[in-house]
Structure formats: structure tokens, C-alpha cells
Amino acid sequence: MSFMPEFNRRSFIRFAAAAPLLGQIAAKNALASAAAAVGKDPKQNIYARLGVKTVINCRGTWTYLSGSLEFPEVQVAQREASAYFVNMFELQHAASKRLAELTGAEAGMVTSGAAGAMASATAACMAGSNPKNIWQLPDTTGLKHEVVMVGGRSAFDNAIRLTGAKLVLVETPQELADAINADTAMIYTTHLGSDLEKENSVAKKYHVPILLDDAAGIPPIDNIKLYAQMGLDLYTFSGGKGLRGPQCSGLLLGRKDLIEAAMLNTSPWEGAVCRAMKVGKEEIIGLLTAVETWLKTDLNVLHREWTARVERIAKLVKTVPDVETDISIPTDGNRYPTLHISWDEEKWGYTVKDCVQKLRSGDPVIEVAGADNPSIVPAVREGNPKPNAKEPKRRGQLEVVSSTIQPHEVLIVGQRLREVLGAARKAAPAAS
């Protein structure tokens, strides 16, 4: 077996498309060398002084990669917030009122991430606003304490379990209805679209609160109003992902009585099970500002900017023979233009995992998305086990997520991918 010749008509077209970018890379490298020679090395930053390398993030808004970069407006608002003392009870209630105005929900609160929202919501649905019950958690004796999880386990369900709740795993709307009993405190789902509508109908029929976890659901910002219009009891988004608010923040929105109960089960209340999930005045003001900023932002403009970034990377990568690319936007969360890069792993003797590790161990450190998850506890098993189910074999592909790539990093990423894949292709057994 042998590869096609290195240069053919298709290769020529790809190199011609990439030629302006290759010229820019050469000029950029010359400038970087000159800057280093006169002591102006951009790598000398606050993290470098601690011995920590910064990362070029092409993987997206993962928590282990420090989420997202805050809107400039958020940074300014947090600095102003940090200059004053304030009563945190008053601030959360004022924020709740403002969130209701912005989203159409009855109320809202700022939490310590979407996982913090899961815990506060669960505590609210079990203990309510009764001080005796609030102090009793995580002991659920005499309380409704079952949470029906549609779709099964997840790596984040410990945010529910730590309140003392018992998980009940189901798959279908019918199984959901069958699982509801006198001990059911809440329904938890990550489903969207028609599945969510069916599950919400079951929740309404049996008068059980439902919590939608849509941590990565923004963008589009329209989702922040959609779920209120659907009449969901509770729903949550991460503040430190697509919302571009403080990394240690989340939004919990929904029914006023449940939001009030969630506040009573959470910091700054001493004796509440979620006391440890503290958010500061800076996170509250910062996340409110992020929501306000998003509601004034044109997503179409952002999509054009994001798409242009990965298109430039694709032009450079496609100069490597036998590499294929396409760009699409996921529909189930993390909705950013994403570049998919693939090659024949078996023919090359070089896997997506090999490429991910090569980029991660290089200088600069570049994080891209493969099949790995460096931040998951190895023992975690998600979903409902189906030992007899056989997963279809999928062609491996590497993903480059546009939204977390900074403009000045685009050429660096494209050239590094070109180098790594070019070297792998030349070293492939079939190339000899």
C-alpha cells in the first residue's frame, strides 16, 4: 500500500490557499525572535513566575482549563464590586429581582457553578424553607429524598448525592412516570427539545419539580428565556463557560418559592448543607454583568469571527496530504464553530490520541479535543449500564473549538498542527 504523490493538483490548490498564512507565520516568527532578543518575551507572565505554563485553548470551556475568558465588562464590574462591603442576603435578593427582569423567570440566584446550582436546587426540593429541615440535611429522615435522574448517572451527580438525596435512574418518559412516588423530591434531566417537553409534562402531571441542567447551553443567549417560557420549575447554566462570567459562578433560575428555598439552603446561611458553596459579591455582580452583556451581543457577528479562526487553521492543516477537515456547530451544547480534523489512523500508524498528547506536551502547550477527558475520576461510569450494547466503531477525529482561541493564537495553532501531522504522515509505515 502506498500514498498518492506528495504534490498533485489538489495539493497545489491547498498550498495556494494557505500561502498568505504561511507568509504571515514567517513574519510572526521573525518578530517573536526579535522581541525575545531584547528581553520582551511574552511568555514571562504571572503564571510563568509560578512555574505554570499557559495554554492555547482549542478544546473549549472545560473547567480544568479554567473555563472561559471573562467579558471585559465583567472584569470592570468585578473590580468595582470588590471596593465595597455589602449585605450578601440583600445582594442575592436584588440579583434575583434583576435576573427575573432579564430572563422572564420568576426568580434567580448566583451559585458556585452549575454543580452548585444542582446541590442548592436539590436541597430546596427536599428541605424547602423549613429551618429544622435545612439543619437536618444531609439526613433525609422523614423528608422526600429521591431524585429521578433521566438518562442515568453522570460525573456531576455527586452534587445531588451530597445533600443526602437518593438517585433513581430512568431512561424514558414512561419509566420516569413509573418511578415517581411519595418520596420523589425532584426530577433531574439534561435532555433538550422534544424529550425535555415530554419530561416536563410528566413533572407537571405529578407535581414534582424538574431541574434542567444545561450548563453549556449558552450560547445562544435565547435559552436563558426559553426555559422560563416552557414553564420549567428550575434550570441552570454555568457562569464560567459560554456566559463568559466568573469561572466560579453559575445561574439557577425558576420558580420563586424554590429559588427562595435554595437561597436558604446555601451560603451565607450558617448551618445550611450548601454553606460550603460560597459565592462572593464579585461573582454575583460579575455574572449579572455577563448576562446583561450577552443580551446586547450579536451572536451572528461572533459566529463569523469564530468561523474565520478555524477556517484559517483548516487552510494550513489541509496542506498535509491525506488530511481532511470540516467545520460544523454542535446542537447539544458548546455551540461554537468547531473544526474537525481526520486522517487514516490505521494507515498512518498515528492516532488522534497521539496527536493530542504531542500538542499537549509541546511548547507552547496546545489543548485540543479528542476522546480523552483528563479531568474525570477514572472510576466514573456514566449513564445506565447496557453490557450487551455494542457501540459502532467511529472514525477518530480531532476537534478544534473556535471560541476559546484568541485571535493572535490562530496561526500558531495552524502551523503547529501542520508540523505535527506532517511529521506523522512522513513517518507512517505506508509512506516508506
Image: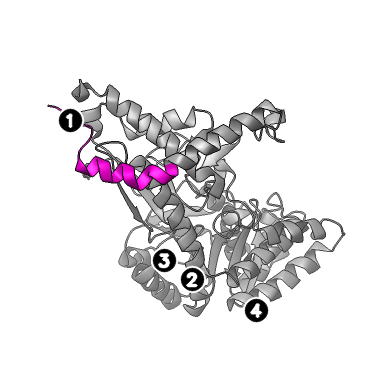
What is the distance, in whole Å, between disc 1 and disc 4 at their CAs?
61 Å
Q: Are marks 2 and 4 in contact (CB under 8 Å)?
A: no
Which label belongs to residue 3? 1
Q: Earlier in the sequence, mark 1 or mark 4?
A: 1
Q: Earlier in the sequence, mark 1 or mark 2?
A: 1
The answer to which of 287 and 54 lies nearer the viewer is 54
Camera-side mark, 2 or 4: 4
Which label belongs to residue 180? 3
Q: Are marks 3 and 2 in contact (CB under 8 Å)?
A: yes
Q: Are marks 3 and 1 in contact (CB under 8 Å)?
A: no
What amino acid is found at the position of numbered circle 3 in the picture? Answer: Ile
What amino acid is found at the position of numbered circle 1 in the picture? Answer: Phe
What amino acid is found at the position of numbered circle 4 in the picture? Answer: Glu
The residue that label 2 is drawn on is 208
What amino acid is found at the position of numbered circle 2 in the picture? Answer: Val
Q: Earlier in the sequence, mark 2 or mark 4?
A: 4
Q: Earlier in the sequence, mark 3 or mark 2?
A: 3
Element type where label 1 sits in the image: loop
Q: Position of residue 384 (x, y in %)?
A: 34, 49
Q: Residues within 10 Å of mark 2 (few under 14, many from 20)?
A: some
